[in-house]
Amino acid sequence: MKSRRVISLLAVAALATTVFVGCGNKEEAKEAGLKDGTYTQKSEADERGYVSSIEIEVKDGKIAKVKYDEANDKGSKLADADYNAMMKEKSGSNPEEAFPALEKALVEKQDVAAVDAVTGATHTSESFKTLAEKALAEAK
């Protein structure tokens, strides 16, 4: 009978420890994670007048949504069909492919360093990563 009580008490103690440790880890992870909100960054205009911009939405301490663009006074590279066709032919990639690929990779990997450059869009990939790092620094 005493052994049953001892085993029951040990089981309760183990369960309580598991619950408290689990709750503590979630709180620590939240503190070490990102603050919820929307964070934006913009670059200076390049030699062709294009300004790169990024908007990162953080929910529950994680990157939930990313929007990246490069635009000048004539508009976004995404909306310029001629530019996209020319870049696809010239480099094998274009903003229509590169921007969404980079955005998706950051949401999936949750780490700027883990985002691979898009082949044929090296400058865009570098700009994306630089702006993402700055935006996420604000979220910490």
Image (spheres, rainbow, N blue to C red):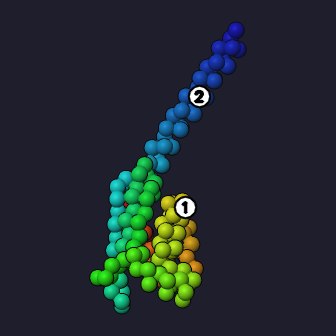
Can you say which quadrant of the picture contains the N terminus?
top right
Tag 2 secondary structure? helix
- Identify residue for label 2: 15
Residue at image point 53% right, 38% down: 22
Residue at 49% of width from left, 38% of height from top?
23
Residue drawn at point x = 54 percent, y = 32 percent: 19
| Amino acid at the residue labelled 2 | Leu
The picture places residue 96, in percent across and down from the top left corner, at: 48, 74
Tell me if residue 97 can be seen: yes
Asked whether 7 or 100 is in front, the reply is 100
- Mark 2 packing: few (<14 Cα in 10 Å), some, or many (20+)? few
**Tag 1 residue:** 109
Name the residue nearer the viewer: 85 or 87.
Answer: 85
Outermost top residue:
1
Q: Position of residue 87 (x, y in %)?
A: 50, 85
| Residue 66 versus residue 90 in the image, above or below | above
- Disc 2 or 1, which lies upstream in sequence? 2
Residue visible at 34% across and 59% down in the picture: 38
Quadrant of the rendered image containing residue 66: bottom left
| Residue 6 position in % (x across, y down) | 66, 17
Which element carries disc 1, helix, strand or loop?
A: helix
- Compared to residue 52, the image places residue 58 above or below, namely above
Instruction: Indicate the position of residue 37 as horizontal and vertical percent values.
Output: 34, 55
Q: Residues within 10 Å of mark 1 (few under 14, many from 20)?
A: few
Q: Which amino acid does the dot numbered 1 rest on?
A: Lys
The mark tally for this picture is: 2
Image quadrant holding the C terminus, namely: bottom left
